[in-house]
Image: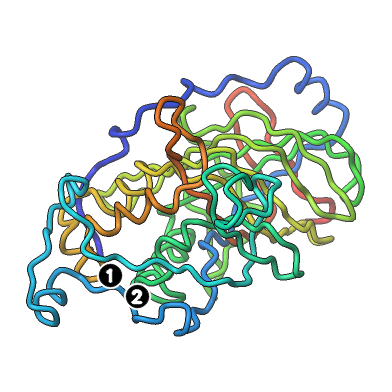
Amino acid sequence: MILPVTVAAAFPMACGAPEPPSAADAAAAATGETRGFVLSKWAMVIPETDPANCPEGFNLNYVEFEEQQGREVATDCDDPAAHPDPGYMTLDAAGTLMGLDLDAVASTLASPGSGTCPHDDFTGLGGEPGIDHQVWRAIGCVRGYQKGDQIDSTSRAAIKDGSLTILLEVAGVNDLVEDDDVQVRIFSSSDRAPLSPTGELLPGASLEVHDDVRFHSQVARGQIRNGVLTTEPVDVRLELTIQVIDFEYWIRDARIRMQMHPDGSGEGVLGGYWDLENFYTVMGRHFLASLAARYLGYTCPGFYAALHRQADGHPDPETGNCTSLSAAWEIEAVPAFVIQRDAPPAQLAAGD
């Protein structure tokens, strides 16, 4: 469903425009190769929902509340905090999913001192504890957010139709299997990556970073261990443009874990903290938002209240309330030439 609105200008910058790489970063990058990638997959981690995890079923929209319970619920999506939560249900059960431990703590609600804004973490696919993905707890009992439904399919399609182009640049690479120090940057691009006849992103495209430095991350330190790239946290802003829609994602303290393959491709996960107000603005506070709520299956006052209940990152220094939610996205990448003005393009993997 296409909702015509422009909202990118609504988000204030946290720390101003990203600074260019430091002299130390530039010197480190000069000691090795620079590899470029374009993401061929960007999809929020959405496990299959066990009906038992939402024992009362999926959330109701405002029309269903009236039809099934005989009571009216506010449709105000611009000021959802002005109305009471009608009983929005979150996903509170234990679960296993792909993700990252963002706070280095195996958090539980039963242990108030077990991390920022205590919450129950998930378990990783390998059995590891402490996986943070509070966004899924907030939306896991909404039918429109399930795997293969509207939001999931739209986000996956955005990569292929050019609505969302994300570039990675990994500099200072001396060894794709073991490397103690690489420098990683994440960019949006206004270019559309070329597709194969079967609809897959083609490797080897030349793609220019976005004109607006707002969509250039700062340098994140990283390392490669046994062919797996991991990075330190860095704030990321990504532009999403669908026809007349102009969205901006603000992901704080984003980090990557990506397996590097011999053919130059990669796959893994990007985790970070999605700013709460940015999340709600993108997903709820926009033109025809009440129609989106009806179509996806929630009420805006309930949805907004749930985001605050599940928030687990960046506590407000005055109130102590958390202002962001941990999140995880599945990513895949293919080699690309990342073009920056006044800088040589990132190379492809050898042989590509």
Q: Residue at x 54, y 32 (%)?
A: 216
The colouring scheme, among rainbow, by chain, secondary structure or one colour, is rainbow
Q: Is residue 333 visible?
A: no
Q: In terms of secondary structure, where does tag 1 sit?
A: helix
- Whichever of callouts 2 and 1 sits on the residue coming sooner in the sequence is 2
Going by the numbered disc 2, the residue's amino acid type is Arg
Query: Residue 296's mark?
Result: 1
| Residue 42, image x, y percentages | 54, 59
| Residue 180, image x, y percentages | 89, 38
Q: Residues within 10 Å of mark 2 (few under 14, many from 20)?
A: many
Q: Is residue 287 visible?
A: yes
- Residue 137 is left or right of residue 9, and the answer is right
Q: Residue at x 18, y 52 (%)?
A: 77
Query: Residue 343's mark?
Result: none
Foreground residue, 218 or 33?
218
Image quarter of the C terminus: bottom right
Image quarter of the N terminus: bottom left
Q: Residue at x 16, y 45 (%)?
A: 82
- Residue 250 is left or right of residue 183, and the answer is left
| Residue 96, image x, y percentages | 63, 71
Inter-mark Cα distance, 2 to 1: 6 Å
Query: Residue 143's mark?
Result: 2
Foreground residue, 41 or 144?
144
